[in-house]
Image: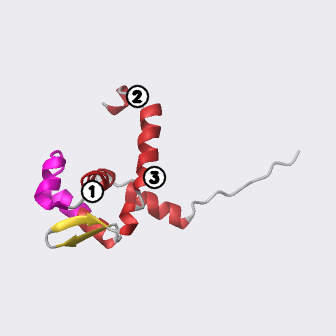
Amino acid sequence: METSKTNYTLCPKFEKAFSILGKKWNGLIIDVLLQDGEQRFVDLAKKIPMLSDRVLTERLRELERECIVDKADSLYQLTEKGVALANALESVKHWSHDWVTEEECS
């Protein structure tokens, strides 16, 4: 009996998307901007107190480079590309509520 060997590879676009969304804090930053709209840095920092200012600055710059977040007049806001993540993040939230236990979070 001959077995078929399939070589699986990630689609480069899929891999890129997960490299952005899988980076710690990016999903939460995007979610805050989705829920609360444009924010000043200080307001984002207050809403995510466990995130240091240095890391928040790094993540915001990364999200700006990816054209997910835009900064104008000291306000951070999602671009059209960022807003388009709303359904994906909502799906992940639903999945996590159904499948991730409290014990796995501690």
The region drawn magenta spans 39-59
Q: Residues within 10 Å of mark 2 (few under 14, many from 20)?
A: few
Residue identifier under label 2: 101
Residue at horizontal 10%, vertical 57%?
42
Report which quarter residue 82 is drawn in.
bottom left
Residue at horizontal 42%, vertical 47%?
90
Query: Which sits earlier in the primary sequence, circle 1 or circle 3?
Result: 1
Vertical side of 31 occupied by 102: above or below: above
Mark-to-mark CA distance, 2 and 3: 21 Å
Residue 12 horizontal side relative to residue 18, left or right? right
User: Residue 5's spot in the image, x, y percent?
Assistant: 75, 53
Residue identifier under label 1: 33
Name which residue type carries label 2.
Thr
Please tell me whether mark 3 sits on a helix, a strand or a loop: helix
Name which residue type carries label 1.
Leu
Residue identifier under label 3: 88
Vertical side of 56 occupied by 66: above or below: below
- Looking at the rendered image, the quarter that the C terminus falls into is top left
Report which quarter residue 56 is drawn in.
bottom left
Residue at horizontal 35%, vertical 55%?
23
- Which residue, as the protein is rendered here, is positioned at the far right? 1
- Looking at the rendered image, the quarter that the N terminus falls into is top right
User: Residue 41's spot in the image, x, y percent?
Assistant: 14, 60
User: Residue 65's spot in the image, x, y percent?
Assistant: 31, 72
48 drawn magenta: yes
